Image (cartoon, rainbow, N blue to C red):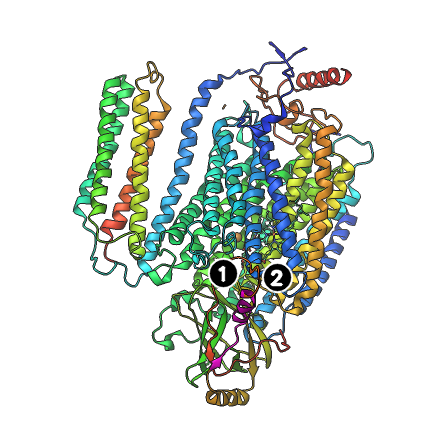
């Protein structure tokens, strides 16, 4: 047994490191998350304009060209600049600390991947200011509309959009290579595959999807860019091209992309329910493996996004059944979480509330997803607000709520201070009510036949649209307590101990915030499965000593 | 707390009764929601509509059952299994149960398969043509079929979609219009073409939708079953005036339809409806007209412009 | 303040492990990269099978003899790079450099041959989907060949750093893996474009 300085009494690092090319995964993680929320505000502001326009039937708030640019940029920003970066931020914070690695496998590549985000983000935002405005053909950018280029300039919104999306792809691939390598090669001694926390399983599954899917989109986008600027005719029927080919490329990636989003959120649910129900995760092995069944199925369902574009009957039936089968592994997870909650000792903390609300919304969204999967119903509601309702329920209602849960849960670990419970609960309440008020009315609208992507609509749709807009504004308000909470608790929130939630996991055996190289050379040896709540078995060798050391250090710190 | 052998869940008579009651309530609720589902949809105006609505109602019922079950458990645990104040201990560690895992893999599988079988049946009887097999412009006789009763279409209508107007041509009667007129209970074949970008042919009251793909001529069949005035909406984003690219569909009796055609043939060609053209002209006068746009195609020259601002049934 | 902190039972030698990551990461990257080619290939096949007139007016097929010679050159370079690695494994650094240089020469010859072929073609990038996909596929592949030659140059220079290649070098392994990858892609591409001419 050797003596080590612990926790490292290094000088408090300067805050300016968050604005530098830093290779520490924990710094990069926070950089990702903060930047992502900056773009979330911009994307949210655009959503407020969308809902402002749609509160009346006429196209009266903004010009139609402006509306089209705004909804396109809303979708693009939310996906490529908010949700993927924020999830990569969580990956950066959680993967190394959960598996006991000092950092990512490729720290410099990691930093490069991050710094590409502000670069393509700036490019995308800059497209608002070029002549002709930003891209306006939706986040799908289907040709021929996307190659129409009315001004004929070489530098145009659509071209910038494609460049930004391509750069985002490069960044995501760099990230994915890094995360997968780290998980495969850098686990702590004793952490076998089936002792790995579920978040790491889901991250591994999600990042594999990125690796398989993204290149197809990149290939398709390169061809679109050539059609736009070089005059090729890959997708232009007048030159022998085929616009539906693009749809295959686009959705071959963009369907799996939705599982890239939701899988880590499944990971978050699986981490948090055991902590706040004080029980082991029900059916750990099934939950872990279900992620990979979802990956496999998720790769063979992409056609369900264009059932109406001219697909043979056999293909429609095949892709319909594939899509619906995803409910089975997903159901396994949902029931496992219910099994975890069952007869637990539930604590309704802020993170727990966000998880419960997220699960509620997710099951609702999954059911509308199954409805969309069935071809006859999809034919009626495809490209209507029913689809918009479905995916905002799952993306905002489940994924973003799950991300909020994660932020409240791990904030003490990585910032070292506790967020305020009262503000957190207020945030939850406003979010839950706002999201349901915002997105539920979209379903009747879609069933009645209101198309999406419209800046004006027939008066019979007004009632539900007003409700949706009110819900949206409530969501806009809901972000205020969140921002207040984050800023004030970061600055002067109460100091957190190393394990404020009494949770089990390697990251909770580190001081809050952890030292730069996490465990350094003293990586503990994992000796049991994760989530051993109530089992009374230690997670690692010498657990008691480690905890004692941490507590002693905290006592000294606070007495100073 | 004995952690050596995790206790089996206890199935007392009372809990079994409670479970049975819950299932009963859920089934009743699901059935009721399934009935409600019909009211969320527009009027049924084609042979396809009752089939689609039946499937949707069934899915609503199944969905209610699943959602209700999950939410009931969530509410129960939040109400009944909350930790006491200051209770810092852990709950009884149940790590899993293979029998349960099998059951709750099987239940969704069976439910989903039931939906799939139903949907495939509807799909087949709808016979919405898989247009990829029908891109060619040759012998139309091989492309018929696909509507209940298997009657030959009485009428073939060419639908031309543009940025941003709809034009309907009746080649047999030598008539063109920007308002779609159909005879009730008569099968009709559309030939969908686009002159520029993707559009979508969507009539909610018919529950049918088909993208119009440039470079392809897509044949598409339906049979209207209810007289009235309905909306046709562009359903595949097509640029600036996408939202305004709507037209009216008038379903009338066979006699009225024949009379309309006969009268229309005599009318001289004139500019049809194109809201985009009107708005484009108004926009050009504005000091700050917004971002660049593709100019709208000139309004189609038709016998009957029709109207698109009369009250409609759906 | 110092606290007693238990060391793990198996202290791990960290830098040695880091080495291994590079290859793992690179293999993962290559798997991902192959999907772009897969996308282009399937796009090519789809456009070709659904085209009414595939070849632009005045073009009746591609000349295949010169590309075949080019292919033989490229495929044999997979052999020479293997020999280079064998030489290195035997400890013969000059043998390694020789075969390595030969591989680079073969790769460069391939690029030269492709440039000659391109300049003699009577159709361009914008000559319908045929022209578009032809230049896209061969160009994108050519870019990979050029990258491969660049990587090899880098590795060759690094081989002159004393002691650099003593413990087996990951960069060499990765480059050679990349080169085999580029070759396999070419074989598929050749079959698709030059051999499958009649539909
Ligand atoms: C995180 C994102 C996310 C997730 C997880 C999902 C999940 C699912 N989605 Fe969704 N979807 C989107 C995001 C997402 N989707 C987006 C963004 C779009 C639109 C993009 C655009 O057009 O712009 C879209 C569009 C979309 C369409 C295309 C509609 C159209 O354009 O016409 C379809 C059709 O099949 C679909 C289906 C499904 C299904 C079946 C699931 C399934 O994975 C759901 C499975 C879950 C459950 C079913 C609930 C839990 C299960 C149980 C409790 C078991 C018992 C259940 C039953 C027996 C039913 N989605
Ligand atoms: C992660 C993904 C994500 C998220 C979080 C959201 C969040 C929201 N979205 Fe959106 N949305 C998409 C992804 C997302 N969306 C996509 C992919 C599309 C499809 C695009 C397409 O068709 O191509 C879409 C489309 C879409 C439409 C359809 C547009 C159309 O078809 O015409 C609508 C309409 O209501 C909408 C609304 C909203 C609302 C009200 C929110 C709310 O949840 C937002 C809540 C916002 C906040 C809480 C922040 C509030 C900010 C402020 C109050 C201002 C402060 C600002 C500053 C200081 C700068 N979204
Ligand atoms: Cu890097 Cu271990
Ligand atoms: Cu999908």
> Which quadrant would residue A349 be assigned to in this image?
top right
Is A559 located above or below residue B101 in the figure? Answer: above
Q: Which residue is more in the foreground, B113 or C126? A: C126
Q: Chain of mark 1?
A: B
- Image check: B123 left or right of A16? left
Residue A489 seen: yes
| Rendered location of residue C147, percent (x, y) | 32, 34
Q: Residue furthest left?
A: C65
Q: Which residue is mark 1?
A: B293
Quadrant (top left/top right/bottom left/bottom right) for the N terminus of chain C: top right
Please provide the residue range marked out in magenta. B270-284
Query: Is the stretch drawn in magenta largely helix, strand or loop?
Result: helix
Q: Nearer the viewer, residue A235 or A395?
A: A235
Q: Chain of mark 2?
A: B
- Mark 2 Cα-neighbour bin, 10 Å: few <14, some 14–19, many ≥20: many
Element type where label 2 sits in the image = helix
Q: Nearer the viewer, residue C37 or C105?
A: C105
Residue A512 picture quarter: top right
The reply to whether the magenta stretch includes residue C80 is no
Earlier along the polypeptide chain: callout 1 or callout 2?
A: 2
B278 part of magenta stretch: yes
Does ligand 1 reach within 8 Å of label 2's beta carbon? no
Where does the C terminus of chain C fall, quadrant-wise?
bottom left
Location of mark 2 (residue): B59
User: Is A41 rendered above or below residue B222?
Assistant: above
Image-based side of C121 in relation to A356, left or right: left
Question: Could you say whether the residue bearing mark 1 is in a helix, strand or loop?
Answer: loop
């Amino acid at each position: 047994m050797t003596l080590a300085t612990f926790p490292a009494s290094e000088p408090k690092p300067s805050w300016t490191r968050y604005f530098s090319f830093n290779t520490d995964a924990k710094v990069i993680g926070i950089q990702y998350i903060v930047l992502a929320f900056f773009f979330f505000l911009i994307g949210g502001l655009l959503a407020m304009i969308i809902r402002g326009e749609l509160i009346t039937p006429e196209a009266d708030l903004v010009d139609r060209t402006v509306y089209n640019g705004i909804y396109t940029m809303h979708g693009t920003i939310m996906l490529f600049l908010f949700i993927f970066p924020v999830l990569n931020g969580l990956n950066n914070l959680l993967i190394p600390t959960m598996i006991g690695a000092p950092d990512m496998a490729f720290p410099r590549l990691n930093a490069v991947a991050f710094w590409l985000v502000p670069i393509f983000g700036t490019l995308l935002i800059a497209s608002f200011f070029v002549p002709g405005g930003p891209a306006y053909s939706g986040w799908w950018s289907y040709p021929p509309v996307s190659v129409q280029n009315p001004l004929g300039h070489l530098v145009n919104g659509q071209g910038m959009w494609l460049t930004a999306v391509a750069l985002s792809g490069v960044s995501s691939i760099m990230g994915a290579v890094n995360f997968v390598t780290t998980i495969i090669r850098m686990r702590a001694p004793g952490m076998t595959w089936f002792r790995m926390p579920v978040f790491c399983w889901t991250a591994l599954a999600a990042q594999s999807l990125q690796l398989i899917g993204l290149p197809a989109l990149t290939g398709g986008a390169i061809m679109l860019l050539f059609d736009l600027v070089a005059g090729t005719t890959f997708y232009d029927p007048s030159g022998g091209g085929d616009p539906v080919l693009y749809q295959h490329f686009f959705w071959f990636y963009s369907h799996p992309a939705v599982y890239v989003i939701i899988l880590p959120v499944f990971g978050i649910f699986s981490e948090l329910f055991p902590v706040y129900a004080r029980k082991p995760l029900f059916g750990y092995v099934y939950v872990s493996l279900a992620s990979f069944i979802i990956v496999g199925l998720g790769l063979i369902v992409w056609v369900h996004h264009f059932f109406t574009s001219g697909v043979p009957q056999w293909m429609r039936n095949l892709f319909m059944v594939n899509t619906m089968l995803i409910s089975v592994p997903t159901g396994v997870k949902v029931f496992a979480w219910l099994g975890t909650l069952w007869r637990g000792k539930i604590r309704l903390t802020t993170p727990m509330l966000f998880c419960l609300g997220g699960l509620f919304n997710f099951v609702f969204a999954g059911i509308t997803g199954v409805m969309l999967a069935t071809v006859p119903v999809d034919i009626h509601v495809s490209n209507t607000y029913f689809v918009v309702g479905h995916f905002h329920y799952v993306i905002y209602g489940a994924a973003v709520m799950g991300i909020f849960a994660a932020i409240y849960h791990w904030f003490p670990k990585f910032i070292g201070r506790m967020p305020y419970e009262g503000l957190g609960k207020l945030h939850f309440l406003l979010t839950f009510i706002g999201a349901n008020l915002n997105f539920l009315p979209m379903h009747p609208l879609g069933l009645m036949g209101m198309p999406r992507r419209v800046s004006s609509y027939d008066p019979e749709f007004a009632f539900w649209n007003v409700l949706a807009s009110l819900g949206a504004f409530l969501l806009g308000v809901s972000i205020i307590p969140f921002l207040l909470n984050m800023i004030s608790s970061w600055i002067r929130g109460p100091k957190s101990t190393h394990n404020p939630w009494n949770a089990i996991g390697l990251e909770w055996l580190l001081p809050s915030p952890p030292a730069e190289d996490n465990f350094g050379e003293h990586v503990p040896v994992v000796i049991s499965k994760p989530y051993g709540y109530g089992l009374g078995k230690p997670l690692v060798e010498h657990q008691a000593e480690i905890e004692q050391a941490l507590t002693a250090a905290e006592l000294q710190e606070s007495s100073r | 707390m004995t952690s050596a052998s995790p206790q089996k869940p206890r199935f007392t008579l009372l809990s079994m009764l409670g479970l049975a009651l819950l299932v009963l309530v859920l089934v009743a609720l699901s059935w009721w929601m399934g009935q409600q589902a019909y009211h969320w949809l527009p009027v049924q105006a084609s042979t396809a509509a009752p089939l689609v609505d039946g499937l949707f109602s069934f899915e609503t019922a199944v969905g209610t059952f699943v959602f209700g079950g999950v939410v009931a458990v969530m509410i129960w645990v939040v109400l009944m299994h909350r930790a006491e104040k200051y209770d810092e201990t852990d709950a009884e560690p149940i790590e899993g149960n293979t029998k349960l895992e099998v059951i709750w893999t099987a239940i969704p599988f069976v439910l989903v398969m039931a939906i799939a079988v139903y949907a495939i049946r509807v799909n087949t009887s709808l016979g919405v043509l898989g247009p990829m097999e029908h891109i060619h412009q040759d012998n139309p006789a091989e492309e018929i079929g696909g509507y209940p009763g298997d009657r030959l279409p009485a009428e073939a209508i060419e639908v031309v979609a543009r940025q941003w107007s709809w034009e309907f041509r009746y080649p047999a009667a030598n008539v063109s219009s920007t308002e779609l007129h159909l005879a009730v209970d008569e099968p009709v074949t559309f030939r969908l073409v686009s002159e520029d970008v993707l559009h979508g042919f969507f009539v909610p009251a018919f529950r049918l939708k088909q993208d119009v793909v440039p470079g392809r001529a897509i044949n598409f069949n339906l049979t209207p079953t209810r007289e009235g005035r309905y909306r046709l909406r562009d359903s595949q984003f097509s640029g600036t005036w996408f939202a305004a690219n709507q037209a009216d569909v008038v379903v009338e009796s066979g006699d009225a339809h024949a009379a309309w055609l006969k009268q229309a043939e005599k009318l001289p060609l004139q500019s049809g409806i194109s809201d985009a053209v009107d708005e484009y002209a108004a926009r050009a006068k504005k000091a700050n007209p917004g971002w660049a746009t593709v100019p709208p195609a000139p309004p189609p020259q038709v016998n009957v412009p029709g109207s698109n601002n009369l009250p409609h049934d759906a | 303040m110092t606290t007693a902190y238990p060391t793990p039972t198996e202290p791990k030698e960290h830098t040695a492990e880091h080495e291994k990551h590079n290859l793992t990461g690179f293999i993962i990257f290559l798997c991902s990269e192959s999907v772009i080619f897969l996308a282009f290939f399937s796009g090519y096949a789809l456009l070709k099978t659904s085209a009414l007139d595939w070849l632009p007016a005045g073009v009746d097929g591609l000349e295949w003899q010169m590309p075949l010679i080019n292919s033989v050159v490229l495929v044999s370079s997979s052999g020479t790079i293997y020999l280079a690695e064998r030489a290195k494994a035997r400890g013969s650094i000059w043998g390694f450099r020789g075969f390595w240089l030969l591989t680079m020469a073969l790769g460069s010859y391939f690029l030269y041959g492709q440039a000659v072929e391109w300049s003699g073609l009577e159709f361009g990038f914008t000559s319908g989907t045929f022209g578009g996909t032809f230049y896209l596929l061969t160009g994108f592949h050519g870019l990979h060949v050029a990258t491969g030659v660049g990587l090899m140059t880098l590795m060759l220079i690094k081989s002159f750093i004393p002691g650099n290649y003593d413990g087996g070098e990951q960069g060499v392994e990765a480059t050679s893996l990349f080169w085999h990858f580029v070759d396999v892609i070419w074989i598929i591409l050749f079959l698709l474009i030059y051999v499958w001419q009649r539909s």
